[in-house]
Image (tube, grey):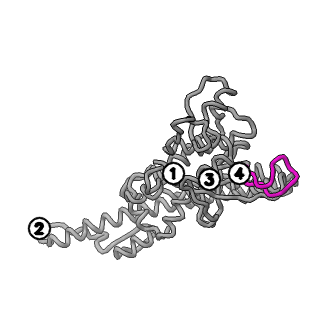
Amino acid sequence: MNAMADNLHTANGLSIQDGRAVGVYTGAVPTGPNVPQNVRDAYTKEQGHISAVNALIDEALREASQADTKASAELDKLARTINVSDTSQAHNEILVEASHVEFEMLRADIPVGKDPELVRAWWSGLTRQQQKDLMRADPVTLADLDGLPPDVGRELRGTDGKIDRVEMVRYALDHWDRKDDLDYGAAGNCTNFVSSSLEAGGMKKKISPWTGLMGDDAWGRQSGTGWDWLDQNAYHSESWARAEGLQNFLLRHGGNEVSRTDARPGDIVFYEQVAPGTETAPGETHHAAVVTSVTPDGDIKLTQHTSSFQNVSLDSREHIANRNGGEQRVRIVRPEPDWY
């Protein structure tokens, strides 16, 4: 039995027999004209608690069965791949898949598609830390539930109303493997993807009255001509598709750099080159990705283009970046627009 059902049955004076909740009136339904009204009311209330606890028990059994199935499948897979010596395969395939399995097992704890009353009982049975962990791990699934308190949705989406962090993350998760509508090539699609995610979250354009999107202090895009070269240079701001441009723009306009322990979905991860001797000059920011999940153990999950990955561990991607390009500095920026 999960903790939520345990808390609920204890708080309401119920007991568990053969895996089901029972109460004072189980097996002795108070009927007849001589039964006091307060007894009838107590019976009705108790039956509601029993129904809620049993629903939570059923949900916990479903989650446990699903977790067992996933764990068994992953152990079988590990047995087949334990001798892999190709580090690229290990990071780009095995670790990515393991990251996805971890995410799915976290999601299995959420009562998706359940009655709002069950969702409400499930949520109220969680500790504040458990609630916080789930909000950072899977904000999109939580935001789509019926039955959570309104303040949960506000916290998930952002209390300032300037960027809807849920919709930003939803866009990234839905488009991670889709072709960008404007191809900037290997050097630019990572930041184009991040800017598109910010746009999906409702971040408003910043356009100069004199130079439009061509100014140094602008962000956004406009409908283009369909000719990539012209659209890349005249219909998007520099901050739209260059990692360093977006990073500096966000930090100039209300954004704040946060620590890894404070990271949450909707933050942006930037890679700054530290090591010399590569095509990227030391001090230059050259890559961007969206934080789409933070697991309860603090593992930050990224979703990105160039190369395309969904909910992959920052630790894993940072290792590859350091191996391929030398030492990198990872910066996590929280966008908080100050121009509207």
Residue at the spot 70% in from the left edge and 57% down from the top edge: 314
Contact, CB < 8 Å: mark 3 with mark 4?
no
The stretch drawn in magenta includes residue 233: no
Q: Which residue is mark 3?
A: 268
Q: Which residue is mark 2?
A: 33
The mark total stands at 4
Separation of disc 1 and disc 4 at Cα?
A: 35 Å
Separation of disc 2 and disc 1 at Cα?
A: 67 Å
Residue 113, position as x, y percentages in the image = 44, 49
Residue at the spot 43% in from the left edge and 63% down from the top edge: 123
Q: Earlier in the sequence, mark 1 or mark 3?
A: 3
Q: As shown in the figure, which amino acid type bears the numbered disc 4? A: Glu
Q: As shown in the figure, which amino acid type bears the numbered disc 3? A: Ile
- Image quarter of residue 180: top right
Out of 211 and 6, give the one closest to the viewer: 211
Q: Earlier in the sequence, mark 1 or mark 4?
A: 4
The stretch drawn in magenta includes residue 275: yes
Residue 191, position as x, y percentages in the image = 66, 43
Q: As shown in the figure, which amino acid type bears the numbered disc 1? A: Pro
Separation of disc 3 and disc 2 at Cα?
A: 67 Å
Front position among marks 2 and 1? 1
Q: Residues within 10 Å of mark 3 (few under 14, many from 20)?
A: many
Q: Which residue is mark 4?
A: 97
Question: Element at badge 4?
Answer: helix
Residue projecting furthest to the front: 210
Helix, strand or loop: magenta stretch: loop
Q: Which residue is mark 1?
A: 337
Q: Earlier in the sequence, mark 3 or mark 2?
A: 2
